[in-house]
Amino acid sequence: MRRFTISTLRDFGMGKSTIEEKIAEECVSLNKYFASFKGKPFESTMILNAAVANIIVAILLGYRMEYDDPQFKRLLDLTNENIRLLGKPMVSLTNIFPLLEYFPGSHKTILKNADELYDFIRRTFVEYLKNLDENDQRSFIDVFLVKQKEVQEEISRVIGSAQPMYSHRTQMPYTNAVIHEIQRVADIVPLNLGHLTTRDVTFRGYSIPKGTYIIPLLTSVLRDETQFEKPEEFYPNHFLDSKGNFVKKDAFMPFSAGRRACAGETLARMELFVFFTSLMQQFTFSSPLGPNNVDLTPITGITNSPKPHEICAVPRN
Ligand code: HEM
């Protein structure tokens, strides 16, 4: 499934200019939406979530959704609530002791929300199946359905009834360093995803048996004082040399590392660069509370996300 996902994302332009065009189109809508507030304070988190989600929506469904589309908002709310709840202790406990599933708690809400999300996905798939044209594979879902169809045909045959442009970044070392530093400080996936050792391992003198549940703390690397001069500060120079050239850091691993690292890294990097640079090109940002009163304490679930807040985006022209 991972291989299918990555190769199909590539077919739909991940890491190439085709997807960059989609990101740039989304930027135009995002800029227009920000401009519509005419410099007055507004809550930006959901809109930014929607813009990022729209890229994957465009890949999956072949079209984008409007930021105030009630169905889109509902899907984003459900996803955000689940991301927040996944970090609750009761959810971790239920993963360890499945019998707790029968007791009340956040895990029940997660399952209810997931049902609603899956229901939307199922309905959308059925709709796409009706209109599927194998010669015009517009979206990820179409490709998936064609693959699924091929698999089904094979089963029948064999078994029968028995189943602003990313390339600019090389010329913009500072912007690139700022974006890296934002990701380092934001520390979006602090605990990474859980992993399991597939064999006995000896690591720095510790023996870890096969089948041990591992939580590879990304926070510890992103805030490592041996790797970053001022780990607790926002300091873009972490990614610049004395001549102002961009420097890569091995400890910069917000997407994790190894064979199961984030499958969307290339896409996410492109989105971050194109959205960020484009917004900065169009607007000057400020907080209605003043620069010293901004609360940067995150809401911690399985991810760190910003608390609800308002910003002012004042058009530069
Ligand atoms: C700034 C944005 C993002 C960050 C910081 C991020 C971070 C991560 C991290 C830390 C993991 C866990 C890796 C591990 O288990 O070692 C992960 C997994 C994953 N991410 Fe992302 N991600 C981002 C955006 C995206 C996007 C846009 C997509 C979709 C295209 C995506 C798709 C995935 C998938 C499919 C996995 C599971 C990979 C696997 O288990 O094999 N991510 N991500």
Image: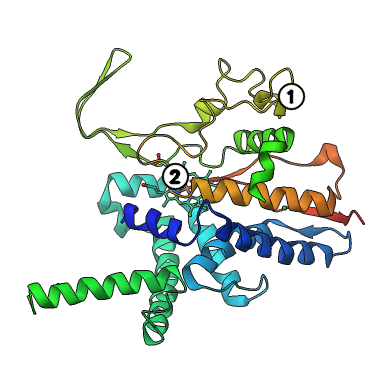
Query: Which one is closest to the eye, mark 2 or mark 1?
Result: 1
* Residue carrying label 1: 244
The image position of residue 288, as x and y in percent, is 86, 50
| Mark sitting earlier along the chain (2/1) | 1
Q: Quadrant of the C terminus?
A: bottom right
Relative to residue 80, is residue 217 depicted above or below?
A: above
- Quadrant location of residue 150? bottom left
- Quadrant location of residue 175? top right
110 left or right of 308 in image = left
Relative to residue 266, is residue 1 depicted above or below?
A: below
> Which residue is at a point 40% across and 75% down the rendered structure image?
119
Residue toward you, 47 or 82 = 47
Q: Could you classify mark 2 by the number of other residues whose Cα lies within 10 Å: few (under 14), some (14-19), or many (20 or more)?
A: some
- Which amino acid, mark 2? Cys
Q: Tally the marks.
A: 2
The image position of residue 313, as x and y in percent, is 84, 55
The image position of residue 106, as x and y in percent, is 44, 56
For mark 1, give the secondary structure. loop
* Residue carrying label 2: 262
Residue pushed farthest bottom? 130
Mark 2 and ligand 1: say if the CB distance to the nearest ligand atom is below 8 Å: yes
Residue pushed farthest right? 317
- Which amino acid, mark 1? Gly
